[in-house]
C-alpha cells in the first residue's frame, strides 16, 4: 500500500488549530484524495514540520489543548475523506527551529498522551475503518530530560509507522562539509548519525522493524568550502549556504523572527540533472567533479573554481539503502520529496516492493580514513555557454521581486547597496551570466536557464 502526504498544515498559533500556509490546499485536496483512492493509495495530512511546530509543546501539555487539536483532525478527516494524520513534531524535547516552545522534562510524555488520545478518538469516530497515525521523527528517539530515550515501546501501540528522517544530517548549518544522508557515518568526522544507525537505534528502543520507515533524500545540500582536503569533510562557512538550484530563493520564516533569512542551498535531483550539474546520473557536468565515499555510500560533487560542495543521493546510493531496508525487514521507505525527482530515483525506490537481495552483506562503518573515489572530472569551463542559455543579460540590475518570498525578509544590505535576493548582470549586453546577492555580497555567479 502506498501512502501520500498530500499537504502540510502548521501549528504556530496559540489556539492550537492547524493552519495551511497555502490557501489552495483545501480547494485541490478533494481531487487528490479521489485520484489517490482510485489507485489504492492512502492520503494523510502532515501537521508540523521544521517551521510548523512552534506550539506543539504547549498544545500537548494539557488535556484541553490536546482535545482542540484532536477535534480539528477528526473533523478534517470526515470532511475530506483522508486516511489519517501524520504528526510531524520532529523534535519533542529539543529546540529544532528557534521559535519552538520546548519542555525538555515533559514533551515526550505529553506526546505519548497526545498519540493515545488521538488513537482513541479516531477509533471512536471511524468504527470499522482504521485511520492511520504516523509520525515523522529525527534519527534518534525522542528526547527526555536526560537526552534520547532508550525505551519508546509505550508509543508503539498508537503509531502505525515511525518515519525516520534519515537526511539533513550534515549541511551548511555546521562545519565541516559532509554527507546529507549517509548510509554509515565516519567516526570523528561530521555528525555521528546515519541511515543504519537510525534504524538500529529505534529498533533498540523498542520499535519493531515492521513499523519503521526509512527516509530517502531526493535532493542535495550545498556548502561553501573554505579549503580542499581531498575528501568530503572540508572546513566550510557555517550558516550561509551558497544559492542552490534555479528554484532556490531567499526566504524568511513568517512565523519566526529568530531564525535567519537566506537561501537554502538545496539542489533538487531533477535540477542537478536538468541544469547539467550531472549530465548523466553518475557523470558530472562542466566544472564539477563527482566523487564517491565508500563509508557514507553517497556521492558528492565539488567545483574547484567556486569551492561549492554538494552532497546528495543518486540511483547508486539509493540502491544501497533500498537493499538494506529489504534485508532488515522494515516497513518501507519514504522520500522527501517526490516532486524533486525526474523519475530516475523513483525507479530505484520502487524496488522496495521487490524481493530481498540474495546477499545482505552491506558496507559497514569503519574508523579508518575513507578513501575517496573520483568518478568523473570535467575540464571544460564551468560557465561555458550551452544550448539552454537564454541569451545575453541586458538589465544592469534585477529587482528582488523576481525572488519568491513568503514575507518581507528585512534583507542584509552591503555598502554598495546589495540587498539579499537581488540580481544583476555580470557583463551587461555581453553574456548571459548574472550575479545574485547572498548575505550582502555579490558572490554567486550563475547562468539563467530556459524554463
Image: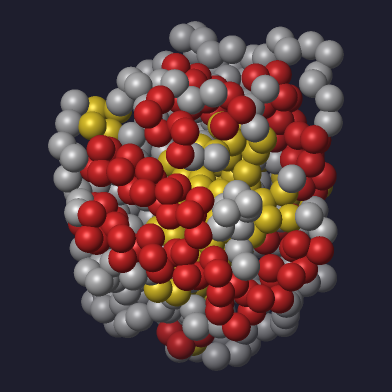
Q: Is residue 120 left or right of residue 333?
A: left
- Which quarter of the rendered picture does the C terminus lie within? bottom right
Residue at 29% across, 57% down? 66
Give the residue drawn at x 44%, y 75%. 21
Locate residue 340, reporting x and y percent: 66, 58
Query: From where the camera sits, is residue 364 visible?
Result: yes
Image quarter for residue 1?
Answer: top right
Relative vertical location of residue 360 with respect to residue 209 in this rendering, above or below: above
Q: Residue 395: percent from the left, percent from the top?
A: 55, 90
From where the camera sits, is residue 243 visible? Answer: no
The image position of residue 262, as x and y in percent, is 37, 65
Query: Where, by quadrant of the figure, is residue 247 drawn?
Result: bottom right
The vertical placement of 303 against 109, above or below, is: below
How is the protein colored in the picture?
Answer: secondary structure
Q: Nearer the viewer, residue 274 or 134?
A: 134
Camera-nearest residue between 50 and 186:
50
Amino acid at each position: 500500500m502506498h501512502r501520500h502526504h498530500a499537504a502540510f498544515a502548521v501549528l504556530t498559533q496559540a489556539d492550537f488549530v492547524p493552519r495551511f500556509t497555502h490557501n489552495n490546499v483545501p480547494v485541490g485536496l478533494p481531487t487528490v484524495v479521489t485520484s489517490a483512492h482510485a489507485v489504492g493509495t492512502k492520503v494523510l495530512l502532515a501537521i508540523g514540520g521544521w517551521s510548523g511546530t512552534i506550539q506543539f509543546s504547549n498544545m500537548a501539555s494539557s488535556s484541553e489543548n490536546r482535545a482542540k487539536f484532536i477535534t480539528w483532525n477528526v473533523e478534517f478527516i470526515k470532511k475530506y475523506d483522508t486516511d489519517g494524520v501524520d504528526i510531524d513534531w520532529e523534535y519533542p524535547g529539543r529546540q529544532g527551529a528557534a521559535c519552538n516552545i520546548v519542555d525538555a522534562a515533559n514533551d515526550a510524555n505529553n506526546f505519548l498522551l497526545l498519540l493515545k488520545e488521538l488513537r482513541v478518538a479516531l477509533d471512536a469516530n471511524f468504527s470499522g475503518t482504521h485511520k492511520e497515525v504516523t509520525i515523522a521523527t529525527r534519527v534518534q528517539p525522542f528526547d527526555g530530560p536526560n537526552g534520547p530515550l532508550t525505551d519508546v515501546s509505550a508509543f508503539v501501540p498508537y503509531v502505525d509507522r515511525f518515519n525516520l528522517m534519515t537526511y539533513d544530517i550534515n549541511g551548511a548549518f555546521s562545519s565541516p562539509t559532509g554527507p546529507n544522508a549517509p548510509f554509515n557515518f565516519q567516526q570523528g568526522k561530521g555528525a555521528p548519525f546515519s541511515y543504519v544507525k537510525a534504524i538500529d537505534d529505534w529498533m533498540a528502543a523498542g520499535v519493531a522493524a515492521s513499523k519503521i520507515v526509512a527516509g530517502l533524500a531526493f535532493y542535495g545540500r550545498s556548502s561553501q568550502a573554505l579549503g580542499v582536503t581531498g575528501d568530503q569533510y572540508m572546513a566550510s562557512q557555517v550558516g550561509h549556504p551558497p544559492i542552490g538550484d534555479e528554484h532556490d530563493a531567499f526566504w524568511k520564516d513568517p512565523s519566526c523572527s529568530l531564525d535567519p533569512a537566506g537561501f537554502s542551498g538545496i539542489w533538487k535531483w531533477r535540477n542537478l540533472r536538468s541544469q547539467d550539474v550531472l549530465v548523466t546520473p553518475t557523470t558530472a557536468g562542466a566544472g564539477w567533479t563527482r566523487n564517491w565515499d565508500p563509508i557514507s555510500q553517497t556521492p558528492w560533487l565539488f567545483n574547484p573554481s567556486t569551492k561549492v560542495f554538494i552532497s546528495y543521493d543518486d540511483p547508486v546510493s539509493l540502491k544501497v539503502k533500498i537493499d538494506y531496508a529489504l534485508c532488515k525487514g522494515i516497513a518501507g521507505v519514504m522520500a522527501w520529496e517526490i516532486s524533486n525527482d525526474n523519475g530516475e530515483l523513483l525507479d530505484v525506490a520502487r524496488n522496495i516492493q521487490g524481493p530481498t537481495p540474495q546477499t545482505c552483506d552491506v558496507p559497514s562503518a569503519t574508523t579508518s580514513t575513507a578513501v575517496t573515489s573520483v568518478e568523473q572530472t570535467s575540464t571544460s569551463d564551468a560557465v561555458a555557454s550551452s544550448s539552454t542559455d537564454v541569451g545575453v543579460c541586458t538589465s544592469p540590475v534585477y529587482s528582488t521581486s523576481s525572488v519568491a518570498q513568503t514575507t518581507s525578509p528585512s534583507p542584509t544590505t552591503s555598502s554598495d547597496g546589495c540587498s539579499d535576493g537581488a540580481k544583476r548582470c555580470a557583463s551587461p549586453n555581453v553574456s548571459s551570466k548574472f550575479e545574485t546577492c547572498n548575505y550582502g555580497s555579490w558572490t554567486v555567479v550563475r547562468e539563467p536557464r530556459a524554463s
